[in-house]
Amino acid sequence: MTLAWELALRYFRRRSSRLVSRVSLLAIAGVALGVMALVIAMALLSGYRDEIQGKLIGANADVVVFPLTSSGIADPESLVAKLRGFRRVRAAAPVIYWQGTAASEAEPEGTNAIVKGVDPERERTVAPLGRVLEEGSRLFAPDAAGREGCAIGADLADRLRLREGETIVLTVPDMAHRGVRFALRRRAFRVAKVFRTNFFEYDSEWVFVARPAARALARFPAPANVLEIKLDTIDRTPEATARVRELLGEGYSVTDWRSLNGSLFSALTVQKITLFLVIGLIVAVSTFTIVATLVMNVQEKKRDIGVLSSLGAPPRLASAAFLRLGMLLGGSGVAIGLAAGAAVCAVLTRFRLVRFPPDVAEIYFVSFVPFEVRLRDVATIAAFSLAVISLAAWLPARRAARIEVAEALRYE
């Protein structure tokens, strides 16, 4: 260990003045508070982004194919066959989407709903949200009264005051008369399952039915109007999307989860950077107490500096010692802040303390936000904090190097 570090550690552990000691503790606490706030803020935004991204990917698959005509996909299995030779494609499933309404006996006026017709076994291979259909085809099997089963979101069930086993009435446009006159088709289904994803958009609107039932409900001529594709990984999604577009040829619009939600993720990235800079000001302001602590230490240790200088120590020794003292003070605050921030995030996530009621969840898209502490964020916070602390400690350390020996020993 160098002499500069020995002096810094000695001054850090032993402070002859009670005022200096209290100001030092205040400096450590200020830095710790700022760092803890940064950790919690970054973990909040990271968790929010991951939650939204996971839910969006989980529901919409990695790549989605739409026909350019309103007649749907006449032969979806031929498209699946074309994709089998592409190693990035793990699975593909034809589905039917309808925008309609859902009503119940308790709420006859109904509410907006998105009806998704799927093949349960195939849907689970392309979208993680398909796990709500783990019962397979049995989920949609008709009961003794002839009502086919469906799975609905928990918030939709609450809004319609429905429980499993009760009847829901779905209404969608009659596609057999499109372009001629507007007509509606209604059909009663049995609520076979109520699912919760913690993503408000799905929990409050989505209804899963069997694909043949969705087709018959709207009298749609084609077996599907969307093809969902699962990739081996979401990395390099644009390249995979371009290859799928090439394989399917003209007549189809091919998009991916990034394109569908690009503006949302860009806004979250800007928000995270802005919040980092704003809360980072807390760390910057807290360094003023470190400056004050070092200035008082320099004044208090002026005699020590004079003695060392008279013994031949170079001026840079005092500068290095007080610079290291500032780093010890600030580094202690950074370490405490990182540990405290991670602990708070763990508690908030473990007990799900950040939850939103339905009316707020409709705005923020999720019902619960986990706090995701990432190593990259922690490293960035630590590097930023230490850089600011080093800059703040440099000025008092420079002042220590300029102390005159004669002035320091004048009254000795």
Image (cartoon, helix red, strand yellow):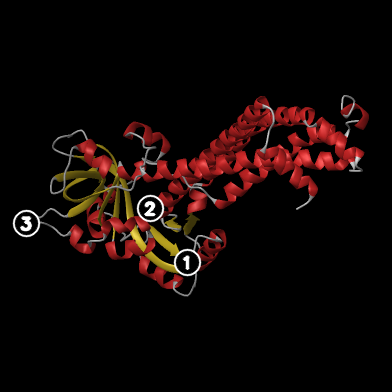
Q: Residue type at mark 1?
A: Asp
Q: Quadrant of the C terminus?
A: top right
Q: Is residue 101 visible?
A: no
For disc 3, the marked residue is 144
The one nearer the camera, 327 or 183, is: 327
The secondary element bearing badge 3 is classed as: loop
Q: Residue at x 40, y 60 (%)?
A: 228
> Mark 2 and 1 residues: CB-CB less than 8 Å, in contact?
no
Callout 3 environment at 10 Å: few (<14), some (14 to 19), or many (20+)? few
Earlier sequence position, callout 3 versus callout 1: 3
Mark number for residue 59? 2
Q: Residue type at mark 2?
A: Ala
The x and y percentages for residue 313 are 89, 43
Q: Say left or right for 140 vs 1.
A: left
Q: Residue type at mark 3?
A: Ala
Task: Please name which of the two marks, 3 or 1, marks the residue nearer to the observer.
Answer: 1
For disc 1, the marked residue is 232
Q: Residue at x 43, y 54 (%)?
A: 57
